[in-house]
Image (tube, rainbow, N blue to C red):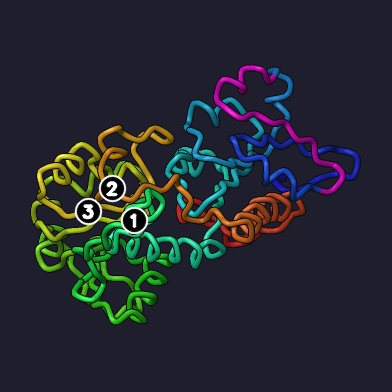
Amino acid sequence: MPGETGASKPIDLLIYGPRKEVIDQGFPAGYVLHKCERADDLEKLSDEARGRIRGIAVTGLVPTDAAMLARFPKLEIVASFGVGYDHVDSAWAAQHGVIVTNTPDVLTEEVADTALGLLIATLREFIRADKYVRAGRWQTQDYPLSTGSLRDRKVGMVGMGRIGQAIARRLDASLVPVVYHSRKPAAGVAYQHYPNLIEMAKEVDTLVVITPGGPTTAKLINAGVLDALGPRGVVINVARGSVIDEAALIEALKSGKILAAGLDVFAAEPTVPEELRAMDNVVLLPHIGSASVVTRNAMNQLVVDNLKAWFSGRPPLTPVAETPVKGR
């Protein structure tokens, strides 16, 4: 029966991805860990080893598609590091009785902090001002007034899940009006809901993107949305790079169709287009939304705890929507 273990039978797990922190949390005696950083490393696993692996900890945004998962005939559970899991083929997993878990809640406040900090840094030009001081230019001339400010902004949230609501709470505290777009209204949320993204973009001057990645949201923020946002427009993305049409964003920034952007995620990480890196009106972060020691430790532990729960005969702690678990 899935999840049951015998005292003398070890549990083989694959630790798949670049982050080693998850391994440091440790597993009790009886677990055998196989470590692969990249897809190429999977080729080094023997057929015999693949045949024993029952769980996978995905510790980065490595492709975990149907072809990869199908190589493990005894696979029972995939525990993914992060709240987004579009890199895991959860539909295939559901069809084959494989549980998928993620790490919600423990990173909500950290990512919300990052989003608000990125928004303020972009509007008030903090990175550019820092460079101004370091270059010694303040000694000869005061830094010019920033064009942007939170004080005259209306924010349109693209997505209103746990993190979106945490960002909105911070904007409330800053006395910034908030509306949102999502496929359907969020339960218990009083902000105005826009079913049409273009219509919302016309009514706001700032977009904060915090919607799941994957094919249903690919290039959701496109040229039409950016045109509707207008020349005062600012785009903040702490979701997935795939959600924004990067070429359209670059063109909008270059042509002045929008004012600025703050980006924590990109289409082909860790590669960032040279055109974005050359712009002074763009703040760029290396996908650090949840990247503090305290939050990453909590995420690591939740990955491990999901695996340990399953293999001790209990339901996983945080299964994703595609693979609900009602009991053991």
Q: Residue furthest front?
A: 140
Which of label 2 and label 3 is nearer to you? Answer: 3
Residue at 31% across, 62% down: 159
- The mark that comes first in sequence, 2 or 3, is 2
Query: Image quadrant for the N terminus?
Result: top right
For the record, the magenta segment spans 28-45
Look at the numbered disc 2 and give the secondary structure of its residue: helix
* Residue 292 in sight in this render: yes
Look at the numbered disc 3 and give the secondary structure of its residue: strand
Instruction: Give the alpha-carbon distance from disc 1 to disc 2, as whole Å.
Output: 8 Å
Residue 51: x percent and y percent?
69, 26
Horizontal side of residue 3 vs 150, given as left or right:
right
Residue 90: x percent and y percent?
47, 43
Numbered tag placed on residue 211 in the rendering = 1
- The mark that comes first in sequence, 1 or 3, is 1
**Magenta-drawn stretch contains 40:** yes
Q: Amino acid at mark 1?
A: Thr
Q: Which of the 4 image quarters holds residue 14?
A: top right
Q: Which residue is mark 2?
A: 217
